Image (cartoon, grey):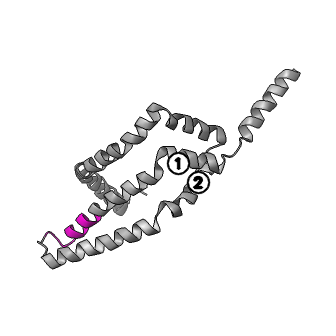
Amino acid sequence: MKQLLLGFLAFFSATCFAAAPSDESVTRLFSLMKVEAMMDGIYSSILPIMRQSMSQANGGKTLSAEETRKIELLSSKLGEILKREMSWAKFEPIQRAIYRENFDQVEIDGLITFYQSAVGQSFINKMPMITQKSMAVMPAFIQEVMPRIQSEMQKIVADVESGKLK
């Protein structure tokens, strides 16, 4: 009985009082995950999207050379602001706090072990391409589902207005 009680207490204390991860281990994990490089890639992919959105905002009419130059200048300046204001140096403490709140030291150590492995590094190295390909198919996916979503929303609005849905 005594051994059972000690075993229960050991299990209970290990699960309830798991050690918070150290700053050093979270920094090591971020390094292995190449988070800073990933963020740079995100910034690089956002700029063309911003330029395209600005160009399309004119209602489909052809832009003059001056309008195109202004869009390029504006998107370039916005990109600089975004990169400066959302830099890894500013974002890293926020991410560190999130990781420390949600993972314990054992979990961080397990993630470090995974990302140090060949499979973990392969995963990290392939994620930018996977993300890029996912983003490339997203507009077509949204275009395909949007009519169904709009139709369903119209039905819901009609049901709410008619009192069928309360």
Residue 15, position as x, y percentages in the image: 71, 37
Residue 161, position as x, y percentages in the image: 35, 63
Residue 74 horizontal side relative to residue 24, left or right:
left
Few, some or many residues within 10 Å of mark 2 (<14, 14–19, 20+) = some
Is 148 located above or below residue 89 in the figure? Answer: above
Between disc 2 and disc 1, the foreground one is 1
User: Which residue in the structure is indicated by mark 1?
Assistant: 30
**Which element type, helix, strand or loop, lies under badge 1?**
helix
Is 38 located above or below residue 157 in the figure? Answer: above
Residue 86, position as x, y percentages in the image: 46, 65
Image mark for residue 96? 2
Q: In which quarter of the image is residue 10?
A: top right
The boundaries of the magenta stretch are: 50-60
Residue 71 horizontal side relative to residue 38, left or right:
left
Whether tag 2 and tag 1 are in contact, CB under 8 A, the answer is yes
Q: How far apart are marks 2 and 1 (CA)?
A: 9 Å
**How would you classify the magenta stretch by its main secondary structure?**
helix
The kind of residue tagged 2 is Arg
**Which element type, helix, strand or loop, lies under badge 2?**
helix
Residue 134, position as x, y percentages in the image: 31, 46
Q: Which of 54 and 31 is in front in this view?
A: 31
Few, some or many residues within 10 Å of mark 1 (<14, 14–19, 20+) = some
Residue at the spot 58% in from the left edge and 49% down from the top edge? 27
Q: In which quarter of the image is residue 59?
A: bottom left
Q: Nearer the viewer, residue 121 or 142?
A: 121
The kind of residue tagged 1 is Phe
Quadrant where the image shows the N terminus: top right
